[in-house]
């Protein structure tokens, strides 16, 4: 089994810092990655 690391996005809002995996962060902005062409 291989391990593929996911990029992490760090976001600071005031005194709070959050870490998101890239797919969760994109989903928060309603951006969806499908990965295949749409017919």
Image (spheres, grey):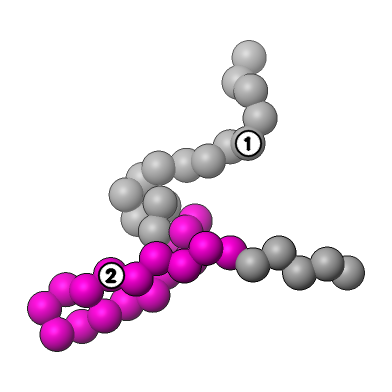
> Where 16 sits versus 34, above or below?
below
Q: Main secondary structure of the magenta part?
A: strand
Q: Residue at x 83, y 67 (%)?
A: 2
Magenta stretch holds residue 11:
yes
Quick check: 13 left or right of 37?
left
Magenta stretch holds residue 12:
yes
> Where 15 sits versus 7, above or below?
below
* 6 or 30: nearer the viewer: 6
Quick check: 35 left or right of 25?
right
Region of the chain picked out in magenta, as a range: 6-24
> Where 25 sits versus 16, above or below?
above
Q: Quadrant of the C terminus?
A: top right
Kind of element beneath mark 2 = strand
Graded by Cα atoms within 10 Å as few (under 14), some (14 to 19) or many (20 or more), the crowding at tag 2 reads: few
Comparing labels 2 and 1, the label whose residue is closer to the camera: 2
Q: Quadrant of the N terminus?
A: bottom right
Q: Residue at x 16, y 73 (%)?
A: 13
Q: Residue at x 53, y 41 (%)?
A: 33
Quick check: 37 left or right of 24?
right
* 20 or 32: nearer the viewer: 20
Which residue is labeled 1 in the image? Answer: 35
Quick check: 14 left or right of 27?
left
**Which of the 4 image quarters holds residue 9?**
bottom left
Identity of the residue furthest to the left in this view:
14
Return the mark for residue 11: 2
Q: Residue at x 58, y 64 (%)?
A: 6
């Amino acid at each position: 089994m291989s391990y593929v690391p996911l990029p992490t996005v760090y976001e600071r809002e005031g005194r709070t810092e959050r870490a998101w995996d890239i797919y969760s962060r994109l989903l928060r902005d309603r951006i969806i990655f499908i990965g295949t062409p749409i017919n």
